[in-house]
Amino acid sequence: MSARKYLEEGLAEMNMALKEMCVLVEDMIDQTVTALTENDTALAAGIHARDKKVDEYEMDIERMCMRLLLKEQPVAADFRSVSTTLKVITDIERIGDQAGDIGELIAANGGVVLKADAARLKMMGILAKDMVKNSVDSFIFSDEKLADETAKKDDRMDELFIEVKNGLIAFMKEKPDNADDALVLMMIAKYFERIGDHAVNVCEWTKYEETGEHVKFQ
């Protein structure tokens, strides 16, 4: 088998692992939304445990990348693809951390979602999952248009966060005895907002891989 064939197979394996890592993180985000809307503390408690698998994916993909860089001698375009993958998995791993943290908050504070408006939090979670999926797809399939479209959705994420924050401030004024619950919800909203930011980072790496220029969306 030619050296080029080995390299192409290695790149395909790397992209497959990246996609699997992303699917796992998407499912974790989806579970946070379910746990929020159904007050399922058992489901929430299990989300954080799944983050260990995300970490394992990160380490496995790092090893794949290093093997390709050191042994297969990739040409410039392939080198950029491998090096940007190392950046992307860092963002995906952090998204897994944040989904796990949301799960911990829900598990430790079961019922808080019943005391304040959960609709916008649910919308933030659904949007976060969508942004993560599309950002990684844009990277794997070298789709700059999808990266641009996905990054623009972060404006809506920021709007939802402000709406949630303002709603919780009003809630705390009306029911000051439940301020702790409101703060928990505020933290959950912030985690969703950060997930959106990491998805935007992935979109930026898509642009970099295609153009060689690191363009900031934010």
Image (tube, rainbow, N blue to C red):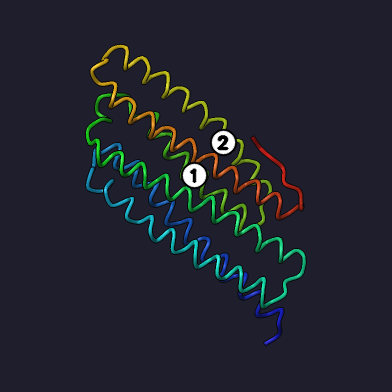
Distance between the alpha carbons at the discs numbered 1 and 2:
9 Å
The residue closer to the viewer here, 43 or 91, is 91
Q: Percent position (x, y) of residue 136?
A: 56, 53
Q: Percent position (x, y) of residue 58?
A: 49, 61
* Element assignment for label 2: helix
- Is residue 30 positioned above or below 63 on the image? above
Q: Quadrant of residue 39?
A: top left
- Is residue 20 positioned above or below 208 on the image? below
Which residue in the structure is indicated by mark 2? Answer: 153
Give, as a three-letter code, the residue at label 1. Asp
The residue closer to the viewer here, 183 or 22, is 183
Query: Marks 2 and 1: in contact by CB < 8 Å?
Result: yes
Residue 130's tag is 1
N-term-proximal mark, 1 vs 2: 1
- Residue at horizontal 71 percent and vertical 66 percent from the top: 78
Quarter occupied by the C terminus: top right
- Residue at horizontal 55 percent and vertical 45 percent from the top: 199
- Is residue 73 positioned above or below 141 on the image? below
* Element assignment for label 1: helix
Q: Quadrant of residue 110?
A: top left
**Dot 1: within a 10 Å radius of its alpha carbon, few (fewer than 14), some, or many (20 or more) residues?**
some
Classify residue 43 as left or right of residue 4: left
Quarter occupied by the N terminus: bottom right
The residue closer to the viewer here, 77 or 69, is 69
Give, as a three-letter code, the residue at label 2. Lys
- Residue at horizontal 51 percent and vertical 50 percent from the top: 133
Q: Percent position (x, y) of residue 90?
A: 54, 53
For this orientation, the residue located farthest to the bottom is 1
**Dot 2: within a 10 Å radius of its alpha carbon, few (fewer than 14), some, or many (20 or more) residues?**
some
